[in-house]
């Protein structure tokens, strides 16, 4: 197991390097001058040149690249061009909020999506199945900035149960959980819609297998057939989708963060892009990429747990 | 469960009793170092934390009313080139950084005048020396006269005074750990969420009545408005839009403040390149713009017609300048005269920023009626700023507010030295330079009547040459709960947001 994890982590190094290089190039290709963004529209070329020199943007691009790579390899992503604060500090300030939202949304997605998907598969083409498919289609079709506003109108303005502003102090756990409810529902219900459809398909395929018919013929209780034989074999595609969706959740969380006024990685990325904060964007992309690598690794490990054949292979 | 949630809400409400909660339409603050505070969100907060040698009275932007701030008095030489400021005694910086001295003032003004440490260095071009005469006296000597020396050292842009020790010790970190003398001190910034400020108990005008300010960054208009409606905010940044104003005015217990400075939108026409190097086409554009319609679209409460290439109310503004009236038939005739009877298509770079894009789309429709088709190349905002400075757009839709003296607007937008694409560029997109002599002469004139005459002459020359077409002036809008008393009537704020002072209070 340890050698598997080590091999996977080592294999991710070229990916991270490629991401570092790509991000470095892309942020510089995008038009827009960081010095002008920082200095505003009254800045003179003299002031802009002075700031560019201070930010290290006046040296050749290769020098900038090697400085960046060599610093990144030692874990130093530098400081934000806009705020001058270390990037790791900036990320550390918002990462817990992103982790909260991602995990809570994933929980909502799995807890709602898997049972509904199974239920729909067990009532194939029945009223329940049609209703589940219809609801999941609606869930997938609604952008989070619409569903989020609806939830705010209902639960914040009408019933006054939850607040509109969803940012909480990190050390105030009850407040953090309380303010997480609506954003997690908003993001999680979209994921639930997706998981419902995948679970339904996987269960239908699984339930039509010979071993299910054999188990039933041997008199195994139906509940056990469904949950042990059916679901376990259907779980690989579900785990794959959940793993993939975590990356999507982090990426998509920006709209939820904006609607519910929460801090988070997504908002920081958008802000850094608007402000042409090259160093911040570079650091954020590496951290984002690292998170995706770790999530994929966990997904792979889960495959082995669910299906011993994968481990043997 | 519901009881528990209600209890939590009550607790949260109690904790906020002395906290003024302000919602701002922005993703995050940038630099809270006052000499780099260029965006609206930064300027608003910086004004709560810093003072200048002099200040606009809270709620006013009238340069004639500038009053003492950190300096309790000042005098100037007969030729207006030497100014001496006498500092108040006992003014304390935030965070135990000690008493303000002349050294801090000299350091701050020199820092603001240096391109490497300030976004406003150009404002100090005329400064020759800044020196401390004694620990409580500062002398500024000018190379040449300026229209308003007090305007440069007021509580605005480069005029803010910082703690020399804090700025030196903190270096670049000063941007997020600033130390000033104002009524509120920065406690912390949570990226993408809020800036928390605490009252400066030793503030020289007396301890503020409000204990804290929670300055919240809420970019989504819908969410910010919902939070305000839900009483989670006491003050809300508003859109300069009649529908928004009318809707908020109808809310119980809410006051909407509409205040100066007005941001003047101008269509800047590049007079050196086709098609606008043809005077008739510039005139056609000027005749095709329907300012009254623009005001109807934006709202009469929040906007007014642009009347010159300098905003209304600025010292030196004149409406008597030969501005071409709306006349579609004349616009079409001029276009035909210029050889474009079948119409003309002009490729224009524009920003995707919603407020500016919607305004430009109205202009696009107005010009289309005259046969002028604007082929809008909509790009992201930072890209827009870069491309218009590379002369990639013959027409530039630009909205700005500046220090309320005609010289600043004329110098930045219509002086030959400020032409984009040159080493001394600022924002002269029209490339006009026919009024340089008048602008320069007015700047150094010590005769106020002569100064006004020269500024009026400059506006006449520029408007008649159609270097730009003034469109609309848009005012600032903020909504507040009626229990928020600013402590002064809010008619204007150079910091582009309500000034929170020691007198501001929240009544029960």
Image (cartoon, rainbow, N blue to C red):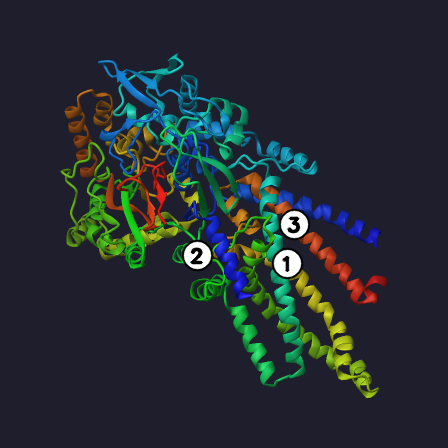
Say if mark 2 contacts mark 3, CB within 8 Å: no
> Which of the image's four quarters has the N terminus of chain B?
bottom right
Q: Residues within 10 Å of mark 2 (few under 14, many from 20)?
A: many
Count up the numbered dots: 3
Image side of residue A209 versus residue B51, left or right: right
Badge nearest the viewer, 2 or 3? 2
Q: Secondary structure at mark 3?
A: helix
Distance, label 2 to label 3, CA atoms, is 30 Å
Residue A160 position (above or below residue B187)? below
The answer to whether one can see residue B129 in this image is no
Q: Residue at horizontal 45%, vertical 47%?
A: B216
Identify residue for label 1. Answer: A103
Tags 2 and 3 on a common chain = no
Q: Measured from the top left, where is residue B24 in percent x and y?
A: 41, 47
Which one is in front, A10 or B486? B486
Spatial CA distance of label 1 from label 2 is 23 Å
On residue B223, the disc is 2
Same chain letter for marks 3 and 1:
yes
Pinpoint the chain carrying mark 1: A
Q: Nearer the viewer, residue B336 or A212?
A: A212
Q: Chain of mark 3?
A: A
- In this view, B377 is above or below B445: below
Foreground residue among A90 and B377 = A90
Q: Is residue B394 left or right of residue A77?
A: left
The residue labelled by disc 3 is A289
Secondary structure under the numbered disc 2 in the rendered image: helix
């Amino acid at each position: 197991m340890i050698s598997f994890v080590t091999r996977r982590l080592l294999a991710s190094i070229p990916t991270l390097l490629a991401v570092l290089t790509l991000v470095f190039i892309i942020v510089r290709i995008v038009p827009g001058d960081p010095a002008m963004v920082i200095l505003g529209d009254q800045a003179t070329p003299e002031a802009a040149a002075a700031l560019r020199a201070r930010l290290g943007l006046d040296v050749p691009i290769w020098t900038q690249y090697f400085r960046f790579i060599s610093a990144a390899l030692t874990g130093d992503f530098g400081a934000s061009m806009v705020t001058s604060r270390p990037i790791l500090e900036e990320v550390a300030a918002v990462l817990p909020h992103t982790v909260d939202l991602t995990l809570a949304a994933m929980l909502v997605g799995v807890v709602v999506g898997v049972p509904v998907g199974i239920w729909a598969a067990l009532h194939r083409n029945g009223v329940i199945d049609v209703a589940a498919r219809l609801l999941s289609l609606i869930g997938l079709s609604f952008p989070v900035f619409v569903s989020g506003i609806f939830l705010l109108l209902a639960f914040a303005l009408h019933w006054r149960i939850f607040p509109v502003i969803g940012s909480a102090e990190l050390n105030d756990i009850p407040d953090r959980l309380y303010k997480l409810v609506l954003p997690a529902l908003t993001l999680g219900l979209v994921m639930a819609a997706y998981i419902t459809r995948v679970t339904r398909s996987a269960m239908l395929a699984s339930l039509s297998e010979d071993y299910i018919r054999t188990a039933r013929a041997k008199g195994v209780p139906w509940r056990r057939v469904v949950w042990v034989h059916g679901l376990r074999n259907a779980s690989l595609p579900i785990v794959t989708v959940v793993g993939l969706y975590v990356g999507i959740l982090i990426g998509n969380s920006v709209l939820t963060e904006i609607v519910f006024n929460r801090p988070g990685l997504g908002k920081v990325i958008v802000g850094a892009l608007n402000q042409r904060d090259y160093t911040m964007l570079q650091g954020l992309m590496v951290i984002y990429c690292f998170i995706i690598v770790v999530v994929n690794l966990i997904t792979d490990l889960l495959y082995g747990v669910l299906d011993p054949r994968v481990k043997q292979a | 469960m519901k009881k528990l949630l209600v209890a939590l809400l009550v607790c949260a409400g109690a904790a906020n009793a002395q906290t003024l909660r302000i919602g701002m339409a922005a993703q995050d603050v940038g630099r809270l170092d006052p000499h780099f505070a260029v965006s609206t969100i930064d300027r608003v907060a910086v004004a709560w934390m810093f003072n200048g040698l002099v200040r606009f009275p809270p709620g006013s932007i009238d340069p004639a009313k500038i009053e003492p701030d950190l300096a309790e008095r000042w005098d100037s030489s007969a030729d207006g080139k030497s100014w001496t400021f006498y500092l108040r005694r006992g003014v304390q910086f935030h965070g135990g950084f000690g008493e303000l001295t002349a050294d801090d003032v000299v350091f701050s003004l020199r820092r603001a005048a240096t391109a490497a440490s300030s976004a406003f260095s150009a404002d100090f071009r005329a400064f020759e020396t800044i020196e401390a005469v004694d620990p409580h006296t500062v002398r500024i000597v000018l190379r040449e006269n300026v229209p308003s020396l007090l305007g440069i050292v007021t509580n605005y842009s480069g005029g803010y005074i910082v703690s020399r020790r804090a700025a030196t010790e903190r270096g670049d970190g000063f941007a997020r750990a600033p130390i000033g003398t104002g009524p509120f001190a920065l406690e912390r910034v949570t990226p993408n969420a809020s800036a928390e400020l605490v009252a400066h108990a030793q503030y020289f005008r007396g301890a503020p009545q409000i204990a804290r300010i929670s300055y919240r960054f809420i970019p989504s208009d819908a969410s910010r408005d919902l939070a305000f409606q839900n009483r989670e905010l006491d003050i809300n940044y508003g859109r300069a839009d009649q529908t928004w104003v009318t809707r908020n005015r109808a809310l119980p217990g809410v006051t909407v403040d509409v205040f100066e400075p007005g941001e003047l939108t101008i269509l800047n026409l590049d007079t050196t390149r086709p098609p606008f190097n043809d005077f008739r086409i510039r005139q056609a554009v000027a005749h095709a713009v329907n300012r009254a319609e623009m005001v109807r679209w934006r709202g009469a409460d929040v906007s007014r017609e642009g009347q010159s290439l300098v905003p209304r109310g600025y010292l030196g503004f004149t409406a008597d300048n030969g501005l071409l009236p709306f006349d579609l038939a004349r616009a079409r005739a001029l276009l035909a005269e210029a050889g474009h009877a079948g119409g003309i298509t002009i490729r224009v770079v524009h920003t995707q920023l919603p407020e500016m894009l919607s305004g430009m789309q109205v202009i696009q429709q107005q010009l289309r009626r005259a046969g002028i088709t604007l082929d809008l190349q909509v790009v992201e905002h930072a890209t827009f700023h870069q491309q218009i400075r590379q002369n990639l757009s013959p027409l530039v839709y630009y909205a700005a507010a500046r220090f309320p003296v005609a010289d600043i607007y004329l110098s930045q937008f219509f002086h030959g030295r400020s032409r984009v694409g040159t080493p001394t560029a600022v924002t002269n997109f029209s490339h006009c330079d026919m009024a340089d002599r008048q602008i320069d002469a007015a700047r150094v004139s010590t005769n106020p009547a002569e100064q006004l005459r020269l500024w009026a002459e400059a506006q006449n020359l520029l408007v008649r040459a159609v270097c730009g077409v003034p469109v609309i002036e848009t005012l600032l809008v903020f909504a507040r709960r009626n229990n928020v008393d600013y402590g002064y009537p809010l008619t204007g704020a150079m910091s582009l947001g309500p000034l929170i002072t020691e007198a501001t209070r929240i009544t029960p």
